[in-house]
């Protein structure tokens, strides 16, 4: 478990003070995959680096497994760091050591016996699928393979927490997917708490349980993947959600609607959970004498739950439309948004 | 040719051995001093492992001071110091002292530049593993920089060969001494040519060996 309590960090460059993180409160529960997303410079890296004190907070507290990490002695901090694995965007492997020795390095630093190191490294090589590369050097590996080595290395001390700072940002989409699958497998098999930083919403949607959106050092929105993706509150969050869920009405359709006379009744219907399969629209239309015209629609899956996003134009008498909407709201509890002009 | 052949080659041989001894010993001592100094320069540098706002600038200034004195002046200037250390101010052993004073700060700088090439990210990753500072120095910085260290030390050795030839000026012995004393001052041109050729050969050998060794380390 990781808990940030009013954590702030300022950097001073000459006379200029940069507020990298600003009064952040955040709790990552044991065994969950928690994602923090934000644009470049939002303070994500600074935040994650406070967890193992690579960066010292200017104020506030960071708790790791109910230990105030800043109160630890140097020796206890080193002990704690062994329980916190970390992987990086640019891998940071030792170029002068083989894959095998890189993976065993944290254990070797901790003074573990050779036999134990050998056993653990073999097990991890197998886990990340690099057994045949044990005696290669990092510069003989592809980016994806290097990240696998980074992951295996981070796991070698059997940590309870894994910190991932842009772990897939240097990789192509396919390799990203395979690394994400690996992280998911780690979380399942070892029940590790994973805190990951990214600027790719795809990554968050793929593996996170919860997400926080960061901007200018602050957490501006936080919640389960489903809540945040289905109903983003903040403009920045909406923009991030847009990058993976195309819910914009195509401009040609907007033009077409605008060219029409009269009042327009256009609503965005958000279908959640198990209702995505129900024929509510046709029921509403049949029972209340309205016509529905689907302008745009998409059904995706978020954390294994179907999530539908429909933009519908209703035609008919105002009172009928009102009743139809009431019906839709009651029956399936969908959220509706008047999207006129947006 | 005025030089008797029976004297010529033994003299050359003796001078070569003197040069090798001078370079070898001064390299040894210069490394003993320069390696730790270079490491200290890197770890006490602002923002690094054991940042030290006093030690770093002081050490930095001292090294700059010694690095800025021309060797030929250093050679003469520290004669009293040399006499205290080795008991005499002439001969091969005496030449070693100024050579060490010359090479140690040079090596410290070269070591510093090699170690600074190691990616800060790798150092940080090791910190995140719970490594102790000395583990970071000896198990990350030095091994990661080894290949570059060897190339840089090769440069230092070549610098030492050049300086050792100058050390002949204070009767230090070796190939430089031979070239100056016989070749230059007594116009025995063939001795001068042979000694210069030997110095060229020596430099070539050292550089070739350094390159090979560095490559082997890099690619193990
Ligand atoms: N060591 C430092 N010294 C001074 N300023 C820093 C330092 N580290 C970070 N900053 C500043 O703090 C702010 C947040 O940086 P941070 O690296 O946490 O952002 P980020 O969200 O990780 O961005 P990116 O996605 O580009 O990695 C930036 O304005 C950055 O310039
Ligand atoms: Mg970052």
Image (spheres, coloured by chain):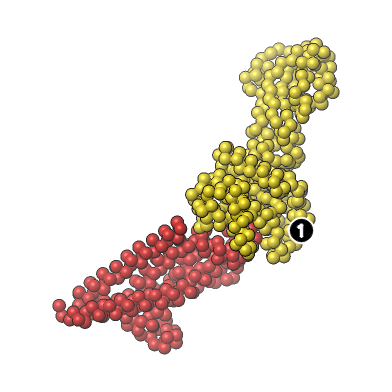
Tell me if residue A191 comes above or below residue A306 in the rendering. below
Residue at 52%, 71% in the rendered image: B36
**In the current view of this chain or complex, which residue is farthest to the bottom?**
B87
> Residue at image x 76%, y 19%?
A279
Q: Is mark 1 within 8 Å of ligand 1?
A: no
Instruction: State the residue at coordinates (73%, 19%).
Output: A312
The chain ID associated with circle 1 is A
Q: Is residue B68 left or right of residue A1?
A: left
| Chain displayed in red | B
Q: Nearer the viewer, residue B150 or A233?
A: B150
- Quadrant position of the N terminus of chain B in the picture: bottom left
Q: In the rendered image, what is the letter of the chain coloured yellow? A: A
Viewer can see residue A211:
yes
Q: Does B6 appear above or below A94?
A: below
Q: Position of residue A61 (x, y in %)?
A: 76, 55
Give the quarter of the image for residue B181: bottom left
SS at circle 1: strand
* Residue at left offset 76%, top offset 40%: A223
Q: Is residue B124 visible?
A: no
Give the percent coordinates (x, y) of residue B84: 44, 87
Q: Which residue is mark 1?
A: A68
Query: Residue A175's spot in the image, x, y percent?
Result: 57, 40
Q: Position of residue A289 (x, y in %)?
A: 80, 11
Q: Is residue A340 left or right of residue B2?
A: right
């Amino acid at each position: 478990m990781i808990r940030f309590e009013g954590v702030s960090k300022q950097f001073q460059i000459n006379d200029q003070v940069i507020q990298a993180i600003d009064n952040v409160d955040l709790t990552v529960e044991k065994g969950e995959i928690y994602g923090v997303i934000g644009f470049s410079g939002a303070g994500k890296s600074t935040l994650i680096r406070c967890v193992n004190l690579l960066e010292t907070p200017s104020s506030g507290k960071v708790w790791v497994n109910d230990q105030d990490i800043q109160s630890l002695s140097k020796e206890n901090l080193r002990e704690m760091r062994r329980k916190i694995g970390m992987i990086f965007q640019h891998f940071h492997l030792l170029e002068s050591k083989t894959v095998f020795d890189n993976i065993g390095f944290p254990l070797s630093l901790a003074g573990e016996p050779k036999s134990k190191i050998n056993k653990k490294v073999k097990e991890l090589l197998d886990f990340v699928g690099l057994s045949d590369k044990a005696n290669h050097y990092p510069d003989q590996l592809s980016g994806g393979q290097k990240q696998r080595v980074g992951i295996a290395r981070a796991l070698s001390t059997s940590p309870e927490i894994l910190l991932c700072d842009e772990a897939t940002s240097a990789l192509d989409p396919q390799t990203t997917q395979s690394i994400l699958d690996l992280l998911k497998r780690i979380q399942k098999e070892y029940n590790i708490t994973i805190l990951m930083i990214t600027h790719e919403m795809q990554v968050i949607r793929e593996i996170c349980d919860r997400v926080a959106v960061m901007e200018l050092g602050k957490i501006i929105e936080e919640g389960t993947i489903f809540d945040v993706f289905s109903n983003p509150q903040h403009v920045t969050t909406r923009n991030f959600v847009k990058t993976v869920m195309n819910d914009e009405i195509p401009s040609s359709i907007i033009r077409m609607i605008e060219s029409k006379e009269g009042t327009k009744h256009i609503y965005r219907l958000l279908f959640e959970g198990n209702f995505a399969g129900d024929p509510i629209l046709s029921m509403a239309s049949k029972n209340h004498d309205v016509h529905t015209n689907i302008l745009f629609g998409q059904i995706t899956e978020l954390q294994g739950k179907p999530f539908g996003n429909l933009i519908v134009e209703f035609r008919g008498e105002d009172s009928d439309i009102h009743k139809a909407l009431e019906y839709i709201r009651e029956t399936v509890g969908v959220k509706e948004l008047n999207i006129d002009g947006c | 040719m005025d030089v008797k052949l029976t004297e010529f080659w033994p003299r050359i041989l003796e001078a070569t051995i003197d040069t090798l001894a001078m370079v070898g010993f001064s390299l040894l001592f210069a490394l003993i001093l320069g390696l730790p100094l270079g490491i200290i320069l890197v770890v006490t540098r602002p923002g690094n492992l054991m940042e030290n706002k006093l030690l770093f600038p002081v050490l930095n200034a001292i090294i700059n001071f010694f690095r800025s004195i021309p060797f030929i002046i250093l050679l003469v200037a520290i004669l009293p110091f040399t006499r205290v250390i080795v008991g005499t101010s002439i001969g091969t052993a005496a030449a070693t002292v100024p050579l060490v004073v010359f090479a140690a700060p040079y090596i410290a700088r070269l070591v510093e530049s090699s170690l600074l090439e190691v990616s800060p990210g790798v150092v940080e990753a090791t910190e995140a593993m719970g490594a102790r500072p000395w583990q970071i120095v000896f198990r990350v910085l030095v091994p990661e920089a080894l290949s570059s260290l060897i190339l840089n030390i090769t440069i230092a050795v070549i610098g030492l060969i050049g300086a050792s030839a100058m050390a002949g000026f204070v009767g230090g012995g070796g190939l430089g001494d031979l070239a100056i004393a016989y070749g230059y001052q007594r116009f025995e041109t063939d001795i001068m040519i042979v000694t210069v050729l030997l110095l060229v050969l020596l430099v070539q050998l050292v550089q070739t060996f350094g390159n090979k060794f560095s490559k082997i380390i890099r690619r193990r």
